[in-house]
Amino acid sequence: MDARAVAAAVATFLVASPAAGAAAGGEVVVRLATDPTPPGVMWTYAGLGTPFELGSPSTAKTVSGLADGTYTVAETAAAGRPTTLTALACNDPSGGTTVDRADATAHVDLTAGETVTCTFTHRALGSRPGARAAQLARRYAPILRLQGGERYRPLRLEDYVATADLRDGRPPHGTLAVARPTLFSLATTAAPTYLDVRTAEPKVRSAGYPAIEQELESTRPRPTVYFHLAYQPSAGRIAVEYWFLYLYNDFYDAHEADWEGVTVFLENGAPIGATFSQHQGRTWIGWASIAKSSGHPIVYVARGSHAEYPGAGRYSIRVCWTTSGGRRCAPSPRVDEARGTGATVGPTGYDLSSLGGVGFTGGFGSGTYILGIGPTRDRVTDPRRRAEYSFPFDEVRP
């Protein structure tokens, strides 16, 4: 090769290649995955130059031209938001990258020319349960027998939240904090907040609730039942909790949102009984006395109040309420109709989903009203903030 050919080859090499002594830049890809989707809120990421945000509709960011070295990518959320990061993983071809989910940080070890992808996964209701927990929940999932004339079905939590606005203060006079919140933007602070269903109010505009329910059912015809497992290793016990959220409690005590539940208790792997939520607490029933079909407990749901009963019937009850004068209880002039004359909703007819994560610290609904009494100071709280959720075993009876 003559001198001119050698010079041309060298020039071509220099144009096509990095300068001598320089390394090709690497890149980091940050991805956001959420459940449910879209979250409707943003997360901020720092450590790769100028901080950036991800959220709907932008769920990925690529930062290129990075020099070799270690980069700490840190995720933060707005103050007062629940912690919902359930997984953090990085794909690093050369290895060396580590993650710390508790601190929501990835320590990226970047080498020349490689691409490291880190995915931050958020699930509003906490980590998904293991296979054994899900199997237990399916094994004892209840059969709901509704009363004829019942207007409401168990809802998905995110669908309920979608009907409401988040307000600061105490109902019914709070100020708007977040219009159309999501599970990712519910408060976890000590300040009073509540979810107020739009376009309807108990006693005043209660006719609006059936229309809202019909719209929700048309969008998602299948009801949702939530489950949660609690453990008492010292006694060999497992509590399989089932929770139902109804849009409206249409009874003597009227209020938005109605959380009810049934818990099946196992001891050394065998069922020993269950508790049924009713107006002033729960009722324990031994397993032998519970009506069952293929091992699934049958639950009779009272019309309007959605109280849970182990047998069909009409039940006289009492209600309690709190006003400025204190706590009072009295027999209700209405009875619970729970004869199972309406629809039957079994495990194949609803979605079974785990209930976990950080509970909403505010109240569900714009207040409770007692017929002939008026508004009270009572509120509906998130099940995840209740003792019967975290440790239900005090309800077990011999």
Image (cartoon, rainbow, N blue to C red):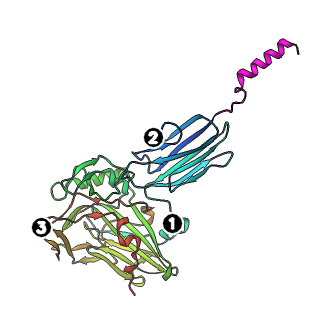
* Residue shown at the point (48%, 43%) measured from the top left: 45
Give amino acid for label 1: Ala
Q: Which residues are magenta?
A: 2-24
Task: Identify the main secondary structure in magenta.
Answer: helix
Give amino acid for label 2: Glu
**Mark 1 vs mark 3: in front:** 3
* Residue shown at the point (49%, 59%) measured from the top left: 127
* Residue shown at the point (39%, 70%) measured from the top left: 389
Residue density around tag 3, few if under 14, some if 14–19, many if 20 or more, within 10 Å: few
Image coordinates for residue 46, horizontal then vertical, percent: 49, 42
Q: Which residue is mark 1?
A: 134
Count of labels in the image = 3
Quadrant housing residue 117: top right
Q: Which residue is mark 3?
A: 373
Between 214 and 167, which is closer to the camera in this rendering?
167
Between 155 and 364, which is closer to the camera in this rendering?
364
Tell me the CA gap for discs 2 and 3. 49 Å
> Element type at marker 3?
loop
**Mark 2 vs mark 3: in front:** 2
Q: Is residue 181 magenta?
A: no
Q: Is residue 23 magenta?
A: yes
Quadrant housing residue 277: bottom left
Image coordinates for residue 391, horizontal then vertical, percent: 40, 74
Q: Residue furthest right?
A: 1
